[in-house]
């Protein structure tokens, strides 16, 4: 059984084309977080892509796995920022942020800037597809008067109005 939907709390990150084939997620997590453990029974026993788990700094627990070839699912449990004394723990905060970015770059093949750009493109696409065209939207009624007012005005001497067949 292969899982089709990510767990509710998972964040999906796009993976650069061909990157998954040359990447071992367990090794990437070990390099970034100093240790990683395979979670064999996380979702499905027949699943070729296993979940991996690690913790580091202010990250209490992070679980990740590849889904198909183009997606990385990540479940991340961090300390509550209210519980962090930033004056005393600034080094740990910076190390945690660097390890997190190293992990995501190693696992997805994208830098933080590229990941941000991809996420913005995805959000923009989902927003535009959810709106639909004005004709498809049943909640929006367009009156004939509105259409008459907003029709493209054509100058009487333009080629589309001439009798020459333009």
Image (spheres, rainbow, N blue to C red):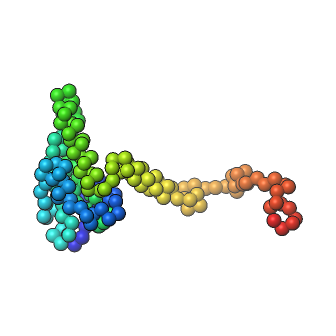
Q: In this view, does 132 lie to the left or right of 32?
A: right
Q: Which residue is drawn at 42% across and 55% down?
A: 122
- Quadrant location, the C terminus: bottom right
Asked which quadrant contains residue 17, the reply is bottom left
Q: Which residue is drawn at 46% across and 56% down?
A: 125
Residue 10: tell me if it is visible.
no
Q: Is residue 97 left or right of residue 121?
A: left
Q: Residue at x 18, y 64 (%)?
A: 50
Front residue (pair 36, 131): 36
Front residue (pair 37, 155): 37
Q: What is the tally of numbered marks visible in this picture?
A: 0
Q: Residue furthest top?
A: 87
Q: Residue furthest front?
A: 22
Q: In this view, does 145 lie to the left or right of 61?
A: right
Q: In this view, does 156 lie to the left or right of 84?
A: right
Q: Residue furthest right?
A: 163
Q: Which residue is drawn at 80% across and 61% down?
A: 160
Percent position (x, y) of residue 114?
37, 50
Percent position (x, y) of residue 28?
20, 55
Percent position (x, y) of residue 75?
23, 53
Front residue (pair 93, 21): 21
- Quadrant location, the N terminus: bottom left
Residue 11: tell me if it is visible.
yes
């Amino acid at each position: 059984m292969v899982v089709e939907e990510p767990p509710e709390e998972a964040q999906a990150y796009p993976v650069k084309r061909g990157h998954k084939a040359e990447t071992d997620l367990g090794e990437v997590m070990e390099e970034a977080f100093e240790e990683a453990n395979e979670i064999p029974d996380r979702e499905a026993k027949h699943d070729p892509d296993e979940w991996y788990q690690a913790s580091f700094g202010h990250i209490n627990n992070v679980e990740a796995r590849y889904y198909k070839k183009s997606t990385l699912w990540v479940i991340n449990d961090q300390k509550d920022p209210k519980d962090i004394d930033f004056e005393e723990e600034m080094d740990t905060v910076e190390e945690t942020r660097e390890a997190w970015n190293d992990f995501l770059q190693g696992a997805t093949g994208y830098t933080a800037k590229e990941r941000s750009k991809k996420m913005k493109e995805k959000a923009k696409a989902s927003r535009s597809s959810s709106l639909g065209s004005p004709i498809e939207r049943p909640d929006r009624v367009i009156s004939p008067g509105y259409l008459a007012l907003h029709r493209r005005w054509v100058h009487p001497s333009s080629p589309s109005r001439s009798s020459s067949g333009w």
